[in-house]
Amino acid sequence: LRDDPGTRTALGSSGLSRLGARRGRQHERPSAAAVRAQLEARIAAVPGAQVAIAVRDLETGLRLDIRGDTLYHAASTMKVPVLFALFREFESGRLAPTGTMRLENRFRSIVDQSTYALDPREDSDSTVYARIGTDVPLRDLAERMITHSSNLATNALIGHLDAARITALTRTLGATRL
């Protein structure tokens, strides 16, 4: 919707076309209708794809919504609010960006309070498990959570930050049905 490096990167990293953006060249910003058409064509090119997109340009107020109210299991998208909550803790001074935490693989369910552990064979980033029992920098856990989708790093950060506070933050950001 805006031709800036962050928009190009976000769209590019999700496998979508750059919507006409070329680095270093002046060009006209595509219309919302053109962006919608390109996104819908890309979605249609993947048989069985279930995609919902909701974008709002905070500067201009421009919105694009393709089934944006469709409910899906949050899966790894919930890792972004965990990262936001961590940054809020850094900003408030409650946690230091250079801080560490003892990494454990024992968690309490927010549903029924039972305890459980994660299986490294079922995690997209099994390398974090080698650090169990050691003090790990919070930044390292955040990096593994976002760039490698580490479930162990995510669960450790949720336990350290407090799931209720993360949920409250998520709701203030507008995700009321997550």
Image (cartoon, rainbow, N blue to C red):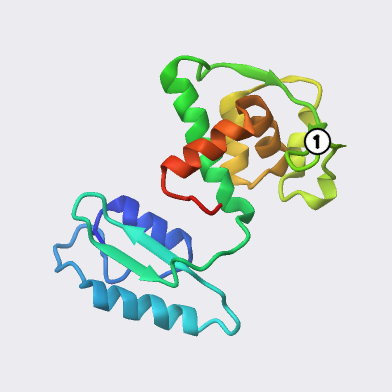
Q: Work out whether residue 58 or residue 134 is closer to the camera in this orientation and state it.
A: 58
The residue drawn where x is 46% and y is 59% is 13
- Looking at the picture, how far across and down is residue 171, in whole percent? 47, 43
Residue 72, given in percent of the width and then of the height, sits at: 59, 64
**Residue drawn 63% across and 46% down?**
148
Q: Is 62 drawn above or below residue 40 in the view shown?
A: above
Q: Quadrant of residue 11?
A: bottom left
| Mark 1 residue crowding within 10 angstroms, few (<14) / some (14–19) / many (20+) | few
Q: Is residue 147 above or below residue 135?
A: below
| Residue 145, position as x, y percentages in the image | 61, 41
Q: Which residue lies under the disc numbered 1?
A: 113
Examine the image and state in which quarter residue 105 appears: top right
SS at mark 1?
A: loop
Total labels: the figure holds 1
| Callout 1 amino acid | Gln
Q: Hey, which quadrant is residue 38 in on the image? A: bottom left
Relative placement, left or right, of 108 versus 98 is: right
| Residue displayed at 43% across by 18% down | 92
Residue for point 26% across, 65% down = 21
Residue situated in front as seen by the camera: 127 or 45: 45
- Image quadrant containing the N terminus: bottom left
* Percent coordinates x, y for residue 119 in the rendering: 85, 45
